[in-house]
Image (cartoon, grey):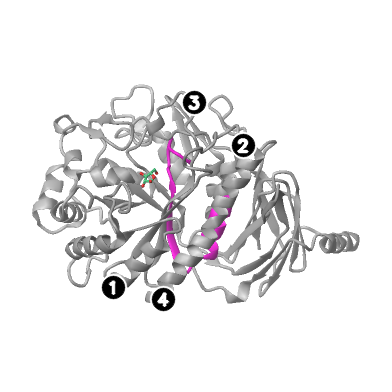
Amino acid sequence: MKKITIAATMFLAASALQAQQNVVTINAKDAKHTISKNIYGHFAEHLGSCIYNGFYVGDTSKTIANTNGVRNDIIDALKKLKVGTLRWPGGCFADTYHWKDGIGPKDKRPAIVNKWWGGVTEDNSFGTHDFLNMCEKIEATPYLAGNIGSGTVQELIDWVQYVNYDTKSPMSDLRKANGREKAWNVKYWGVGNEAWGCGGNMVPEYYVNEYRKYATFMTDWTNSDKIFRIASGSNSADYHWTETVMKNIPTNMVEGVALHHYSVIDWGAKGPSTTFTEQQYFTIMKRALFMDTLVTKHAAIMDKYDPQKKVALVVDEWGGWYEVEPGTNPGFLYQQNTMRDAMIAGVTLNIFHNHADRVRMANLAQAVNVLQAVILTNKEKMILTPTYHVMEMYNVHQDATMLPLQIKSNDYVVGKEKLKAVSASASKNKDGVTHISLVNIDAAKAQEVVINISGASYTNITGRILTSKTLQDYNSFNNPAAITPEIFNGAKLTANTLLVKLPPFAVVVLALK
Ligand code: AHR
């Protein structure tokens, strides 16, 4: 416990008055929704070096320690991260993927061409067994994305039977013949991906019929296996898509509706991943904060058809998207990850927490070597990105009860535009510890934040911070620990009021007991 003198208390009170423009009010009594661990999900697509030369180096690798071909350093890092769901095999790739190509003896598997991502030839050495066994090692919950674009209903129901049936069936016999006795019991299933685009360029009125057909055969009448079917969702602000899906698919046929939103400056000029300007940073933060509007509006549509909130909003692709690193394959989407990405992660997770009643799963795009990755690899080297560190600092919120809050924030101004500088979320875990996550997105100004908490009392505070010298800083293979979380001493507790000094572009997580 921090002992606070009378003089210090008066100083804090005076500072609090000066800084009252940033005020967070937390009401611990009104807590009712759980922050699902599944919000901390990731995405692993057959894209660039996410799977091959990323997660999977093959079991003959002499230089990289692995378990059945999956890098041990990645397994350890993702276990520590406490990954929720791990989505595979796409993405756009999912609607071209025929799962039977990826089972059985590796030398008998057919090669395929990855038509969406670089046109490279893959040997299918990483398939269903490899993915699901890897999830067991990482302790992540698998989420399989089914192919409804170029696949068939029979193919998808065979996949469900192959991975989930313990009783005798043609597909469980095949699984056993391929060396896996026990079913994996995969709960989460995507019914197509981006059906409005690479998943088939469908209009929503057509997609809903496709969805209903596939969803029917994936289960029995009562869905006694309790699989969780996720409908392909809207592209950012396509509210008509969500409206059509919710209106035409009964809530007993769908457990989740997806939403994809990337923070992109402009699809034609995405800007560099590390040498960006403040204006480019500001635009990316504007796009990231837009997630709040998206989630609010899609959730309001869902409320009309599903007032009991049975169906989850599943943000199964989100993150920053920039130009690829110079000299790399444009189809591989390989980009570096800076403090800007840490800011995106911090504000986005706060938004998901604050909408925990409806947002019950999310998947950052993507886990390894693609887009806003938490891990980058280069031969035997592996680094953890600033995004990794934010997700690790924030994982204390997993399965905790969200504490509702209001924020009064200063503006972060660039040119004629402004954004709220301070973002926050809070939760209380089963041991009674309250965690508060704070982000100051302002590129230059520190922010003093007064946090008033009602309905709980605390005597002890600790904290961690992620920040750096410049927004453009990143962890490189030569300097992998340039940005790592540190102990934060910038918060003072008096009675139930906290005064926190957030440096510019910083992410802070506080623990109160
Ligand atoms: O994450 C990269 C791609 O972005 C995915 O394959 C697709 O679903 C989205 O357009």
Amino acid of disc 1: Pro
Give the quadrant of residue 177.
top left
Q: Are marks 4 and 1 in contact (CB under 8 Å)?
A: no
Of mark 3 and mark 2, the one earlier in the sequence is 3
Q: Is mark 2 within 8 Å of ligand 1?
A: no
Q: Is residue 42 left or right of residue 52?
A: right
Q: Decide: few, some or many residues near mark 2? Use Cα within 10 Å; few <14, some 14-19, many ≥20.
A: many
Q: Is residue 183 visible?
A: yes
> Whole-percent x and y of residue 281?
61, 42
| Mark 2 and mark 1: Cα distance apart in space | 47 Å
Label placed on residue 326: 3
Quote the CA–CA distance across marks 4 and 1.
13 Å
For label 4, the residue is 304
Which residue is found at the position 37% from the left and 72% from the top? Answer: 310
Q: Position of residue 56 (x, y in %)?
A: 33, 33
Closer to the camera, 429 or 368? 368
Residue marked by disc 1: 250
In the picture, measured across the screen, residue 229 lies left or right of residue 379, that is: left
Q: Nearer the viewer, residue 128 or 269?
A: 269
- For badge 3, the amino acid type reads Pro
**Foreground disc of the pair 3, 2:** 3
Answer few, some or many: residues within 10 Å of disc 3's Cα (few below 14, many 20 plus, some between 14 and 19).
few
Q: Which one is earlier in the sequence, the residue at label 4 or at label 1? A: 1
Q: Secondary structure at mark 3?
A: loop
Dot 2 or dot 4: first in sequence order is 4
Q: CA distance from mark 4 to mark 3?
A: 47 Å
- Counting residues from the start of the chain, the first of labels 2 and 1 encountered is 1
In the rendered image, residue 318, in percent from the top left (x then y), is placed at 46, 50
What's drawn in magenta, residue-wise?
346-372
**Mark carried by residue 483:** 2
Q: Nearer the viewer, residue 365 or 376?
A: 365
